[in-house]
Amino acid sequence: MNRIKYFFQFFVFILFVNLVLPPGVTAQKDHDTDQDSHEHPGMVMAEAKEDPVLPQQVKVEEQLGNLAALDTYFTDENGKKILLKTVFDKPVVLLPAYFMCTSVCSFLQAELAKALNLVDQVPGKDFNVITLSFADEEDPTIANTSKKNYNNLIARDFPLENWFYLTGDMENIRKLTDSLGYYFIKKKDHFYIHPSVLVVLARDGKVIRYLYGPNFLPFDLGMAISEADRGEPGISIKRGVLSFCFDYDPHKKTYAFKIFKITGTAVLILLLVFIGFLLYPSKRDKDKKDKTVS
């Protein structure tokens, strides 16, 4: 009887892992425990004590449904000056960053690269990517070096000409970031205080979704790109619900409800109830047995 019991317990465990737990959940947990080492809260907290207005200066005011300033000019990593609008022939994933930062910005760029490896949409076909420097002292040479560094993390077929590393003057930078509701400040040379967030936009520049760092889940990014393709700002939903209940349909370029996974979970619950019925006699049967013995 014990062997049967252990067999069923093992079977239920394997079924639970395959049906219920989303892919990568263990890796994500390990990853999350390490993320604090990549932030610089001590520096920011020290500055905040000196400047109590800082929390009002560095923030994100979401502009969902509004248009970004696409009439701005920047220079790409090859030294070519471009009108931002020309990059928006398809949805765009935009990450504001400081290329020379060795702390959270480097982590954000690495996280974006890793997430891009796993999204279902095809880069260059379904979306473009922009990493925008908000530091006006950075130039195309620095942008080119940064692009090479983080492009090395791309493990899939990725047209790198569709990933733009842009620099510009502060007038154009502020015009764009203000239109995104992204506010940062420069406290001293090579030290910026800024939000950790990327923005997904539709091809017309409409702001669709904000994804907050320091880590970006591929599913969240894929969902945002899908919403950007439709041009509809997304609604914030708890991450656990999304990763469990939706699946990507490459033909419709949208996320569909995981009916088979939900059904599988229901079957698992029924199976657990049935096993419990078989392995554990009811209290009534036990009482009946006790009366017989007495």
Image: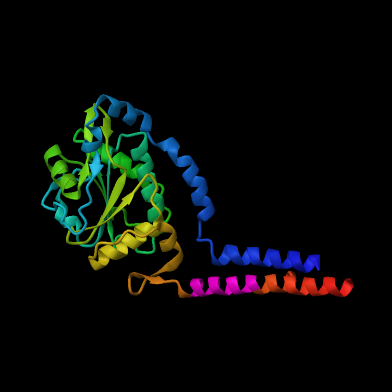
Relative horizontal placement of residue 49, taking residue 262 as reference (left or right) = left
Q: Is residue 266 magenta?
A: yes
Q: Is residue 172 magenta?
A: no
Q: Nearer the viewer, residue 42 or 90?
A: 42
Q: Is residue 67 above or below residue 172?
A: below
Quadrant in the picture for the C terminus: bottom right
Using the rendered view, name the quadrant where residue 143 is placed.
top left
Relative horizontal placement of residue 290, taking residue 84 as reference (left or right) = right
Scheme of image coloration: rainbow
Residue farthest toward the right in the current orientation of the protein: 294
Q: Is residue 77 visible?
A: no
The span picked out in magenta is 260-273
Q: Position of residue 191 (x, y in %)?
A: 27, 29
Quadrant in the picture for the N terminus: bottom right
**Residue at point 74% right, 64% down?**
6
**Residue at point 72% right, 74% down?**
278
Q: Is residue 263 above or below residue 216?
A: below
Q: Position of residue 193 (x, y in %)?
A: 27, 34
Q: Position of residue 175 (x, y in %)?
A: 13, 45
Residue farthest toward the top in the current orientation of the protein: 50
Relative horizontal placement of residue 144, taking residue 256 as reference (left or right) = left
Q: Is residue 58 visible?
A: yes
Q: Nearer the viewer, residue 287 or 69?
A: 287
Q: Nearer the viewer, residue 205 or 269?
A: 269
**Residue at point 64% right, 72% down?**
273
Main secondary structure of the magenta stretch: helix
Q: Position of residue 73 (x, y in %)?
A: 13, 47
